[in-house]
Image (cartoon, rainbow, N blue to C red):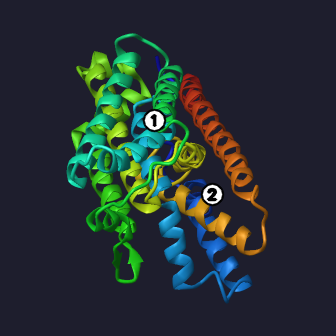
Amino acid sequence: MQSIESNALEPTRAELATMSFGQKIQRLLPVYGLVILTVFLILLFSILLPQTFPTMLNLRSIISDKTIIAILSLAAMIPMAAGRIDLTIGYGIVLWHVLAISLQTMFGLPWPIAVLIVIALGALTGFLNGLLVEIAKIDSFIATLGTGTVLYAIALWHTGGRQVVGMLPQGFYALNGTMVFGLPITGIYVLALAFVMWIVLEYLPIGRYIYAIGANPKAAALNGIPVRRFVIGAFVTSGTLAAIAGVLLASKLRIGQASVGLEYLLPALVGAFLGSTTIKPGRVNVWGTMIGVIILAVGIAGIQQFGGSFYVEPLFNGVTLLVAIGIAGYAQRRRSHAGRMAPAQASQLSAKPAEK
């Protein structure tokens, strides 16, 4: 069952070629409006908070805090591109970061082996989600919510409600704690991952197949695209990235506890949904997702530095999610209306008698 429709609304070069300058601005503003708003917020907070916002310390803090959300947003956008949704990312990270630590402290495994086991389990969970959605034909929202809840229950059982602590090797700490040019190495991870995903989704056949499935799975199947295989692959990739995020979270926190992780689900989904409203409106895309995460990070950091209370972040995330979904829905309806009007206008012109 399809949960999310994926259609691109960005103007084509042919469309832009027939427009005036004013029409081009009007047409491109919804495409790059979120980018413009992000730049505006950065400049505004830099002017209003010159001592704290435009500083290297604040940049390091933002990168360190939002890396996990950025990876989870990229993980969420892959099934979204195929017209599905994966809620397991928010629940799974609870278990993955706990296991990354407990496999070392409780079972004495070397940290590289522990990391590989966690990533393999994440991929296996994604494969299970794919089977539930494509073979059992369970709606992806319900299937991944159920799977995620089971993972969360396993994390609670494994920890017994207590923290998992112990001495970990420096190599494991370095996964998150290394600095490159004065910035956390996790920022490099995100950029590299985003670049690879951009190449795959925009320039390789697999990306075109996934977007085609998201736009119309029946038409994709009729054109010979193995829908089931690609959807399952999308869930496997999502589960793998969620497990990687869990490993980085464990390296950052240095303790495992089942009460940590669920708070990443909402902002990750917000980032992915925001990504469908910019760069390529109406279609989830890599750089749009990155812009979505950045505007969340900038907005929350600026508001908190103004003295915002502890509830500001969830409030900001929730309101932004509603706005993002509203904008995406409006854009879809507007494009659908334009698509219906164009054939009607063409038929009227063809039916109009020629003037003598």
Asked if residue 69 is positioned above or below residue 241 in the image, the reply reads: below
Which dot, 2 or 1, sits closer to the camera?
A: 1
- Relative side of 234 to 110, left or right: right
Q: In the rendering, at what x and y percent does residue 44 appear?
A: 70, 78
Q: Residue 80 carries which label?
A: 1
Asked if residue 190 is positioned above or below residue 204 in the image, the reply reads: below
Q: In the rendering, at what x and y percent does residue 107 appear?
A: 28, 43
- Residue 14 seen: no
Judged from the image, the secondary structure of the residue bearing numbered disc 1 is helix
Name which residue lies at 30% across and 35% down.
121
Asked if residue 2 is positioned above or below residue 283 in the image, the reply reads: above
Q: In the rendering, at what x and y percent does residue 349 appear?
A: 56, 29
Judged from the image, the secondary structure of the residue bearing numbered disc 2 is helix
- Badge 2, how many Cα within 10 Å: few under 14, some, many 20+? few
Residue on which the image places disc 2: 26
Front residue (pair 9, 289):
289
Q: Which amino acid does label 2 sit on?
A: Gln
Name which residue lies at 27% across and 49% down.
115
Name which residue lies at 30% across and 22% down.
227
Q: In the rendering, at what x and y percent does residue 75 appear?
A: 41, 44
Q: Which mark is residue 325?
A: none
Quarter of the picture containing the C terminus is: top right
Question: To which quarter of the image does residue 352 belong?
Answer: top right
Name which residue lies at 37% across and 43% down.
99
- Badge 1, how many Cα within 10 Å: few under 14, some, many 20+? many
Front residue (pair 117, 10):
117
Do the CB atoms of the residues marked 2 and 1 lie less than 8 Å apart? no
